[in-house]
Each structure stands twice: as C-alpha cells, then as structure tokens.
Amino acid sequence: MKAAAIVAVAALAFGAQSAMAQEPGHCKFTLKNMFAGPYKACFEPSTPEKCAELGKTDDNSDAVHGAGSCPATGVVGTCDMGANGKNIYFDGDAGGLEIGCGFQGGEWKAGG
C-alpha cells in the first residue's frame, strides 16, 4: 500500500511539472508589416509554437519564446485584445500604435 501511495504522489508531481511546462509564456519579436514597424514587441500569452508562427507572419522576425509575462520595463503601450491576447510595444509612436490597436479590435493603454 505504501508503494502505491508513493507512485501516486510521484505521478501527481510529474503531472504538475508537465502542466507547468505547458503554461503559455510570452513571445518577444520584431513586428513589421505593410502598415507598421519595425517595432520591438511582445505578445502574451504565447506557446513556443505560436511564437514561431508569429515570427514568420508578415515581415516579423527575431521571435523568441520565454516563460511568464512580457517584460514590464520600457513599454510604450499595450494593445489588449481580450481573449486574443496582448501586444506590448517597446518602441514606436504611441498615437499611431493606438490607432492600429483600434483596427485590431483592442483597447489601448499607454505606458507600462
């Protein structure tokens, strides 16, 4: 009975580690398309797969996935698109980015 309990605890611990490894993080990248950029940006939440895809969209580049949230320092503004995630910008004109955010159906928040 003790061995079964140990196996059950080990399975729970492994399951918790697996769930943590699968938690979405963030994707830092250079955003560039026919309307904007290049801008240093970060998208959250993002899986490694979503980050790789984002780095290949339009003329985007330099996509790197990381754990947790996007960095909070040096933020020009954030476009919060609700259930579709957040684009966080680290350079660019806040007014122009706010307009672009509106086209994405998001809510703009200036600064960090």
Image: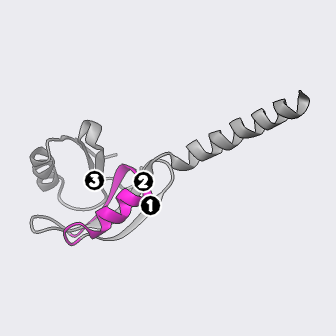
Quadrant where the N terminus is found in the figure: top right
Q: Earlier in the sequence, mark 3 or mark 2?
A: 2
Other residues around mark 3 within 10 Å, as few (<14) / some (14–19) / many (≥20): some
Which residue shows up at 44% across the image and 61% down it?
Answer: 65
Question: Residue 13 location in percent, x, y?
Answer: 71, 39
User: Per the image, is 45 magenta?
Assistant: yes
Tell us which disc is closer to us: 1 or 2: 2
Mark 1 touches mark 2? (CB < 8 Å):
yes
Going from N to C along the chain, the mark reached first, 1 or 2, is 2
Residues at marks 3 and 2 touching, judged by CB atoms closer than 8 Å: no
Q: Nearer the viewer, residue 54 or 87?
A: 54
Pick whichever of labels 1 and 3 is earlier in the sequence. Answer: 1
Magenta-colored stretch includes residue 52: yes
Q: Residue at x 26, y 36 (%)?
A: 82
Q: Is residue 24 above or below residue 50?
A: above
- Element carrying mark 2: loop
Q: Mark 1 — residue?
A: 65
Query: Which sits in the foreground, 47 or 31?
Result: 47
Q: Position of residue 40 (x, y in %)?
A: 30, 64
In the figure, residue 17 lies in which quadrant? top right
Region rendered in magenta: 38-59
Q: Position of residue 88 (x, y in %)?
A: 30, 52
Residue placed under numbered mark 3 in the picture: 76
Circle number at residue 47: 2
